[in-house]
Image (tube, rainbow, N blue to C red):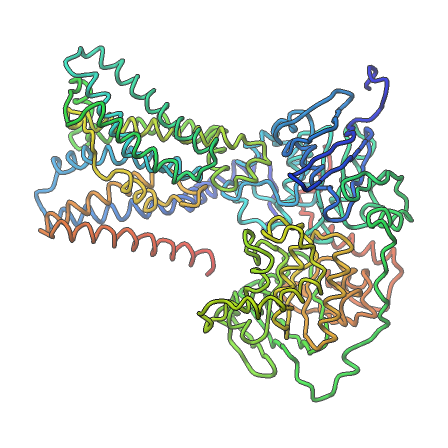
């Protein structure tokens, strides 16, 4: 036990402590970044031609899943889970593609704003149902998975529609330096603009609070129901962003997207967010998405059977989480 | 000064509040009136409706009938947040701190001003708190103190303290009582809920007593009001525990008798340095320690959920190593935890909970034989006088009855060695006495019982002798006959145990020890506002 006393001076004097604490609290994400660095080197070794185009392609291809992972992470932090992320992506993607088809570039701005509002509304419906009916999150959002998926097919039966040129150019190419893909910049900008202010506000604390201990949060005066609905709304917003990025990167709307929902859960778990709620952030899951994607790329380079690659992905997922938890446990009880 | 009020000078007044849960009547007609500047005790046995009234006052539950007025204005709060805005803050038995946030973020979450919080945290003797610590890394006692400081910092009109001193070590308890006492005569008022009569007598002005959902009495607190309060609570004068005059088990023991459970030089990292003891069949051995002296690790090791880093454990003279609580149970060692939620399947019935240990034997895969199980369960239920009205789900029982279920499950299977870790925490007096009696009966029937307790008076009521742990070492062994509270408290602070000192000197010594332990060089100026 140290005998230091809390004073403003000490707060200032201990900024080194502060950095150490921050590093310790984000050790999972830092570890993931390390794994990613190693993977990039491995990729370069097995495929010496992997360079700017590879990185660019990687950034574009991970963008929708990264946004989906952020969406999922926010709900999971608030001790929920949203199985309808993929369907919401599909619905927002087809709605945007349908509305933007053969329209002016200016109109597309309205469409983007409208689709983002749509995402908030979809999330609000999910959240309100969870809060009001008290049916478990997993059941409500499983039902909504089918409902939103059906709605998406009603809007657009087959892939089609279009995308505004500015939206398409937002994710392709690079910025300033050719090593900085636009898609990555967009991803970080969106997360920084939406998530970081929220994270630092009382609302962000409330999200963590209801995930960590709902009873204590209630007794601390947190509006638990409202915060939960808010978490689902944020999830809807990021799902809509993910849906827009699908439209932007392909130029058309996709009514049946890939297995984004389950991959988003995988990324959240690998990204160090506790499924029991209250722990983790959104950057871990983003790095996890890149890792998962890069592993697949490497498997392709190594000519591994794609089915086997899927198996390997699962093994790596459970392996990393197990080893990571073991390290954390060891550190706690030496 | 509420000049407009004509009918009353009460700061908080609850009138004829009632609440039913379906057919169960939680509150019939409870009233509570608290004056400005008063510390008011709210008393009642478990199930008297105390916690329902508290929940109604804090807005967690809405009453069916009745009115609540604060400073003469009628008020209905629908959530703790709303009650808080209305000037009513509660410190609950379970701290309302978010485990995954650091203390600073927790303060931000409740919009607590920092300066007054730091002032109060120093007053309460926790000056070395680091605001960047995660709440989950702090001991329960610190969390409760933080919760209290956080409530005091916003200067509420009504502060409700629910079993504030339960689970606090003696030195912190003293600080808390001092602070509560200082609040007397202020602008607010405090509703003080505690099972400890000495605390009520020390800090409370008046007491309201509830029984079976009704307010049965309001009285001025004086030194001799304890009996009257207990009488009101129980509706009858509670039978005192039979005095057990210095019956030392050690003198009756045959010289060659082997201890049922023994430890030699037990170690666990930095928490436990050297613990040795002998526990014989037929005795209750008390364990006394201030908060965080290694008793948690000690009981974890004995119950098989933690492996010692050194030392030896002997059952019936044979060295044993436990890898799992099941190993301990196989050796006849069962564990009753303070936290009922740790031991019970909250959503299952009383019957299943009691039957679990003997239906969960590893080799017993087949169907459970209800016919064989039922009589054992029934015997245990009637022996412990468990109130089985809500037996479908254990979580609906009161705390005292839940604790009885955790004990009953071991009694039903037949008990050899029982480890009890603060089993009476937060339980009303009557149930406590029933638990002491039960422990005595078990011991007399040949069981060996190890009892850790944070309430020093329990040692003389239930134990034959006691060991005292301080800083991870056994520093004293005291026979129950000599184990009055002052002696135990001194031993727990590791003060020299010379010839008995006059009581004032003892208390002064304890206070000084607490002082030097808690205060740091810089905090001398801390008491200045």
| A201 displayed left or right of A179 | right
Q: Position of residue B473 (x, y in %)?
A: 65, 68
Which residue occupies 64% across, 55% down? B402
Q: Is residue A59 above or below residue A112?
A: below
| Name of the residue lying farthest toward the front | B371
Of B166 and A283, nearer the camera is: B166
In front: B48, or A267? B48
**Residue, x 50% and y 33% (percent of image)?**
A206
Q: In which quarter of the image is residue A254?
A: top left
**In the image, residue B60 lies at what x, y percent?**
63, 34
Where B406 falls versus B25 (above or below)?
A: below
Residue A81 appears left or right of A36: right
Q: Which corner quadrant of the image does residue A328 belong to? A: bottom left
Is residue A282 visible in the rendered image? The answer is no
**Along the line of sight, the residue nearer the viewer: B499 or B49:** B49
Does residue B153 appear to the left or right of A275 in the view shown? Answer: right
Work out whether residue B453 or residue A36 is closer to the camera in this orientation and state it.
B453
- Label tally: 0
> x, y percentage for residue B164?
71, 45
Residue A15 sits above or below residue A182 on the image: below
Q: Position of residue A332 (x, y in %)?
A: 46, 56
Residue found at x 59% / y 63%: B354
Residue at the image point whose x is 34% and y is 33% from the top: A144
Residue A9 visible to the viewer? yes
């Amino acid at each position: 036990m140290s005998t230091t006393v809390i004073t403003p001076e000490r707060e200032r004097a201990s900024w080194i402590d502060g950095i150490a604490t921050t590093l310790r609290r984000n050790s999972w994400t830092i570890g993931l970044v390390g794994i990613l660095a190693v993977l990039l080197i491995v990729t370069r070794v097995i495929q010496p031609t992997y360079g700017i185009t590879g990185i660019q392609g990687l950034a574009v291809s991970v963008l929708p899943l990264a946004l989906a992972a952020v969406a999922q992470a926010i709900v999971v932090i608030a001790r929920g889970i949203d199985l309808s992320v993929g369907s919401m992506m599909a619905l927002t993607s087809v709605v945007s593609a349908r509305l933007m088809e053969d329209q002016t570039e200016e109109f597309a701005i309205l469409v983007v704003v409208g689709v983002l509002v749509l995402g908030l509304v979809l999330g609000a419906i999910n959240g309100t149902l969870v809060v009001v009916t008290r049916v478990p999150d997993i059941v409500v959002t499983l039902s909504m998975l089918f409902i939103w998926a059906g709605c998406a097919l009603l809007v657009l039966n087959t892939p089609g529609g279009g995308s505004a040129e500015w939206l398409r150019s937002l994710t392709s190419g690079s910025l300033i330096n050719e090593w900085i893909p636009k898609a990555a910049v967009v991803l970080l900008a969106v997360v920084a603009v939406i998530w970081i202010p929220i994270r630092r506000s009382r609302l962000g604390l409330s999200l963590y609070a209801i995930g960590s201990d709902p009873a204590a949060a209630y007794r601390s005066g947190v509006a638990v129901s409202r915060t939960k609905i808010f978490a689902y709304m944020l999830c809807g917003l990021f799902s809509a962003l993910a849906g827009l990025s699908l439209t932007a990167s392909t130029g058309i709307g996709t009514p049946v997207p890939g297995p984004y929902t389950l991959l988003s859960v995988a990324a959240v778990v690998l990204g160090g967010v506790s499924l029991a709620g209250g722990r983790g952030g959104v950057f871990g899951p983003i790095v996890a998405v890149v890792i998962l994607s890069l592993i697949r790329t490497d498997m392709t380079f190594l000519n591994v059977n794609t089915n086997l690659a899927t198996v390997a992905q699962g093994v790596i997922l459970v392996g990393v989480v197990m080893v990571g938890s073991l390290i954390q446990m060891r550190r706690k009880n030496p | 000064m509420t000049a407009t009020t004509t009918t009353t000078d009460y700061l908080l007044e609850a009138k004829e509040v009632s609440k039913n849960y379906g057919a169960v009547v939680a509150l019939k007609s409870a009233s509570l009136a608290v004056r400005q500047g008063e510390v008011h005790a709210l008393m009642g046995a478990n199930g008297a409706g105390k916690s329902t009234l508290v929940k109604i006052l804090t807005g967690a539950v809405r009453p069916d009938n009745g009115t609540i007025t604060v400073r003469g204005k009628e008020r209905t709060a629908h959530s703790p947040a709303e009650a808080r805005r209305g000037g009513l803050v509660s410190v609950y038995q379970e701290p309302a701190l978010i485990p995954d946030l650091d203390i600073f973020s927790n303060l931000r979450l409740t919009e607590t001003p920092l300066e007054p919080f730091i002032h109060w945290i120093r007053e309460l003797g926790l000056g070395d708190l680091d605001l960047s610590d995660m709440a989950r890394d702090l001991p329960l006692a610190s969390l409760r103190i933080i919760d209290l400081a956080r409530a005091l910092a916003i200067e509420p009109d009504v502060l409700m303290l629910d079993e504030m001193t339960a689970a606090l070590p003696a030195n912190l308890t003293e600080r808390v009582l001092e602070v509560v006492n200082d609040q007397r005569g202020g602008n607010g008022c405090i509703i003080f809920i505690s099972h400890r009569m000495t605390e009520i007598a020390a800090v409370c002005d008046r007491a309201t007593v509830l029984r079976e959902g009704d307010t049965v009495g309001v009285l001025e607190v004086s030194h001799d009001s304890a009996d009257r309060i207990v009488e009101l609570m129980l509706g009858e004068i509670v039978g005192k525990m039979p005095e057990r005059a210095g019956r030392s088990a050690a003198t009756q023991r045959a010289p060659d008798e082997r201890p049922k459970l023994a430890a030699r030089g037990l170690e666990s990292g930095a928490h436990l340095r050297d613990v040795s003891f002998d526990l014989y069949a037929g005795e209750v051995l008390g364990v006394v320690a201030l908060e965080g002296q290694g008793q948690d690790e000690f009981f974890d090791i004995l119950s098989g959920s933690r492996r010692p880093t050194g030392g030896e454990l002997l059952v019936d003279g044979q060295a044993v190593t436990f890898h799992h609580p099941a190993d301990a149970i196989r050796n006849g060692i069962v564990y009753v935890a303070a936290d009922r939620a740790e031991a019970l399947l909250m959503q299952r019935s009383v019957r299943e909970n009691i039957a679990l240990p003997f239906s969960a034997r590893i080799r017993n895969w087949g169907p459970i034989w209800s016919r064989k199980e039922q009589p054992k369960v029934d015997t245990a239920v009637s022996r412990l006088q468990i109130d089985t009205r809500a037996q479908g789900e254990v979580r609906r029982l009161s705390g005292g009855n839940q604790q009885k279920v955790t004990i009953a499950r071991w009694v039903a299977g037949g008990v050899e060695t029982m480890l009890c870790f603060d089993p009476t925490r937060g339980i009303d007096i009557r149930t406590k006495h029933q638990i002491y009696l039960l422990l005595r009966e078990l011991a007399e029937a040949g069981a060996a019982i190890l009892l850790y307790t944070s309430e020093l008076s329990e040692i003389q009521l239930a134990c034959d002798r006691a060991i005292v742990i301080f800083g991870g070492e056994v520093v004293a062994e005291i026979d129950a006959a000599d184990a009055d509270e002052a002696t135990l408290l001194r031993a727990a602070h590791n003060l020299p145990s010379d010839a008995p000192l006059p009581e004032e000197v003892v208390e002064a010594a304890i206070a000084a020890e607490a002082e030097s332990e808690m205060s740091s060089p810089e905090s001398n100026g801390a008491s200045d506002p």
